[in-house]
Image (cartoon, helix red, strand yellow):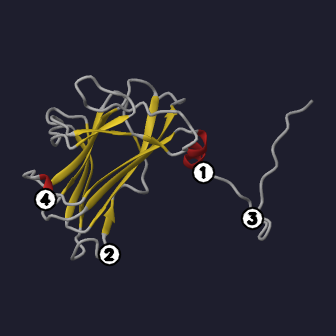
Amino acid sequence: MGWLRKPISKDSATDAMMFVDYAHHEIHNGSHFFVQYSVASLGAMGSPDDMITLSWTTPNTTKWGHLLYSANGSAGWRLRLIEGKTGGGASPTGSITILNSNRNSTATSTAKDLAGTPVANKVSYDATLFTGGTTIWDQYLEGSGGPQSGGVGGGNQRLEVVLKQNTTYQLSLFGTDANPASMTMEWYEHTNRLAL
């Protein structure tokens, strides 16, 4: 018997072909993950820099994370993604459990937090700012004039970053005023099949 191919699905009203892109497929497949971290006020943390951070380490395998991230809030802020470090990343307040985008899946992320004994499927929050390393993204976000009055958003929402294996990363948001803020990261994990 020959190889059988599934028929292409079409929308009944328009006869348009229906498909999902690869990242969407990874959601269905249970290999897509996300983390969100929000604070009511950056200034309430008492940090000299009024900042929040998310920090993690990738595994030493060719199962690489394909990352998108964003930030939202109401003040004038700076959003940075740093790869690797020569210092910093100390004293995280705690860790956030990474969630699978397919809530029916039991698969967990291979990312690890920065705890003394790193834990998989966790991201550290509010560690000190990384020093050294490579700045992948550095963006200034304009303010909007008041707490969430229209809000402002930014970040790497269109350009996918394939994370380097066995490497620490930190996403940070600096502020100067006591305003609400959120950072969101999403990624899928895919084993690389190409020789680089």
Relative image position of residue 96 (x, y in whole percent): 33, 40
Question: Which amino acid does the dot numbered 2 rest on?
Answer: Gly
Q: Which mark is first along the chain, 4 or 2?
A: 4
Please give the label number shown on residue 150.
Answer: 2
Question: Which amino acid does the dot numbered 3 rest on?
Answer: Ala
Question: Which amino acid does the dot numbered 4 rest on?
Answer: Gly
Relative image position of residue 78 (x, y in whole percent): 21, 58
Relative image position of residue 139 (x, y in whole percent): 25, 58
Q: Which mark is first along the chain, 4 or 1?
A: 1
Mark 1 residue crowding within 10 angstroms, few (<14) / some (14–19) / many (20+): few
- Disc 3 designates what residue? 16
- Foreground mark, 4 or 3, reads 4
Q: Which mark is first along the chain, 3 or 1?
A: 3
- Foreground mark, 2 or 3, reads 2
Place residue 99 in its image quadrant.
Answer: top left
Asked if labels 3 and 4 touch by Cβ distance under 8 angstroms, the answer is: no
- Disc 4 designates what residue? 43
Alpha carbon of mark 2 to alpha carbon of mark 3: how far?
Answer: 36 Å
